[in-house]
Amino acid sequence: QVQLVESGGGLVQPGGSLRLSCTASGTFVSINAMGWYRQAPGKERELVAAITRAGSTNYADAVKGRFTISRDNAKDTMYLQMNSLKPEDTAVYYCNADCVVQAVGTFRRYSNLEVWGQGTLVTASS
């Protein structure tokens, strides 16, 4: 019903910048919260930043002041502007969305569906 596609990852020098994009497509009523997660080799997947449909944001302490999350609801797209990248930012970054879809086989009108993108690799290395 919903697919998320990330783009914008790549190799940058420490101190450099990248902008990640995540675009949703498919059949859905709306998207509530969205977020960026990352997973480094040998580590657990962690929340980087999240944003509600209304635009309220939340950031992991490690990226505060350096990363900015935003979304364009008209384009069903979320962004992550990453500045002053550090080697420890190296990870696969995943887009996540809490989607509202029309329900079938239940008395409820809508259902919530968590969707993940395929991930995009960010490498900050000299």
Image (cartoon, grey):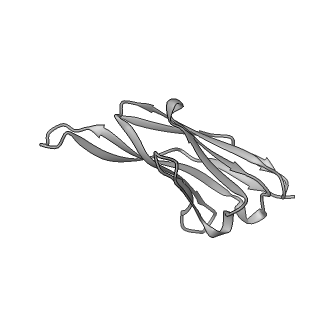
Q: Where is residue 22, by image quadrant?
A: top right
Residue 105, horizontal then vertical, whole percent: 14, 39
92, above or below 71, in the image: below
Q: Where is residue 9, by image quadrant?
A: top right
| Residue 9 in view of the camera | no
Residue positioned 83% across, 52% down in the render: 16
Which residue is at the front of the view, 40 or 100?
100
| Residue 52 in view of the camera | yes
Quadrant position of the C terminus in the picture: bottom right
> How many numbered dots are placed on residues in this image?
0
123, above or below 64, in the image: above
Residue positioned 31% across, 47% down in the render: 112
Residue 52, horizontal then vertical, whole percent: 47, 50
Which residue is at the front of the view, 23 or 64?
64
Residue positioned 60% across, 65% down in the render: 60
Which residue is at the front of the view, 65 or 114?
65
Q: Which residue is outermost to the right?
A: 126
Quadrant position of the N terminus in the picture: top left
Residue 118, horizontal then vertical, whole percent: 53, 44
Residue positioned 63% across, 64% down in the render: 41
Q: Is residue 14 left or right of residue 48?
A: right
Q: Is residue 92 left or right of residue 24?
A: right
88, above or below 27, in the image: below
